[in-house]
Image (cartoon, grey):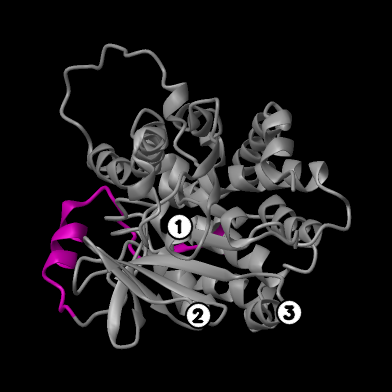
Amino acid sequence: MLKQNKADRIGLILSGGGARAAYQVGVLRAIANLLPKDACNPFHIIAGTSAGALNAASLATHAHRLRTGVRLLEYVWKHISSDQIYVSQSSNFLSNASTLLSMVASKPDNPALALLDNSPLAELLSRVLKLDQIQTNIDKGLLDALSITASAYHSGESVSFYQGIKGLQDWEGPHRVGRRSRIQLQHLLASSAIPILFPATKIEGHFYGDGAVRQLAPTSTAIHLGARRVLAIGVSANSAKLPPREEPAEAPSLSQILGHILNSAFVDTLENDLEFLRHMNDVLPHVPKRIKNQPGFRQAINLLEISPTKELNQMAAEHYEELPKTLSRYIKQDSSGTLLSLVLFEKGFCTALRQLGYADAMAKESEIREFFQD
């Protein structure tokens, strides 16, 4: 790791979004190529949410060499397929309203309450991730902290489970808490458990779901853990929105409604949080020095954001033929692009996302080099 003082600690934020997280791997490949070949992990704090938590954990387990961690991610995402992530729990999936009605009526202690079974994902992660290596890397000074964020169904709070160096303190804020933990497989499964699609995961007696839900300030975890420079890799492509089009005057399908709900959880929070931090950075130069010097006053955060320059829902629609037949019967080609982009864990779509991520990052080469300059 590049040795820097506390004021220069770098945080990496990997947001969530199902299959969209393949985009992050392309960005990380570009960063690895721009840094020295033998570079260790350049990020002091790595914070992952939802599918981004899986990428974050892989980097943390290979903190001794960035390129090795990125190569593992590339291998996994290059050979990914939906049957390695989930299997359908219901032959009716989204087509039959009785599926959801039966779920609503199910007993609350049923841990498998979901339309998809993510046990294949658990098997995949168990094979490719050596989570015990995280503490070893922390002890060697290669990493300050790894944070995995999940949503607590019992309290409605956004909980950031973090594993890090001594001296880091738990925190509490509006609807969010930080809790020291030893990151295990269940933390990753909980953080990536998209509501309704994947089952909740039990941690320390409580059930948790996807970390993107109610995560109002995605950057706050890395900042709490000491980051003063933040690289955020988003997956929403808000900047690449298509122009509005005339929609048919028809009632939305169940998959469209579900996609709309999930879109609200995965799309806007990181962008809104980064915009808030930028406004804060603009205001800070005008704050009197006597106030700035007070203990606990937040200093300016150096920000770098890399996000898709193409609309990912549209990209997913272009790869619709890859969708497994068990789902294509219920997720129609003209239905929600959001839902499709979340579950389309197939080679063509994920390859296109990785290529886009690499291109978008290389387009910001000068900014990336400046960001990592010691």
Dot 2: within a 10 Å radius of its alpha carbon, few (fewer than 14), some, or many (20 or more) residues? Answer: few
* Quarter-of-image position of residue 186: bottom left
Q: Position of residue 204 (x, y in %)?
A: 34, 87
Q: CA distance from mark 1 to mark 2?
A: 15 Å
Specify which label sits upstream in the sequence, 3 or 2: 3
- Count residues near mark 3 (Cα–Cα under 10 Å), then give few for <14, some for 14-19, many for 20+: few
Q: Label 3 to label 1, Cα distance in Å?
A: 22 Å
Measured from the top left, where is residue 64 in percent x and y? Answer: 78, 69
Q: Are marks 3 and 2 in contact (CB under 8 Å)?
A: no
Instruction: Name the quadrant of the N terminus.
Output: bottom right
Q: Which residue shows up at 64% across the image and 55% down it?
A: 80
Q: Which residues are magenta?
A: 83-108
Residue where numbered disc 1 is placed: 223
First of labels 3, 1 by sequence position:
3
Q: Amino acid at mark 2?
A: Gly
- Is residue 117 visible in the rendered structure shown here? no
Sequence-wise, which precedes: disc 1 or disc 2? 2
Q: Amino acid at mark 3?
A: Lys
Q: Which callout, 3 or 2, points to the residue nearer the camera?
A: 2
* Membership of 299 in magenta stretch: no
Three-letter amino acid code at disc 1? Ile
Q: Which mark is residue 140?
A: 3
Name the side, left or right, on which 298 lies relative to 305.
left
Could you say which is closer to the camera, residue 346 or residue 188? Answer: 188
Can residue 53 be seen at all in this image of the molecule? Answer: yes
Q: Which residue is mark 2?
A: 167
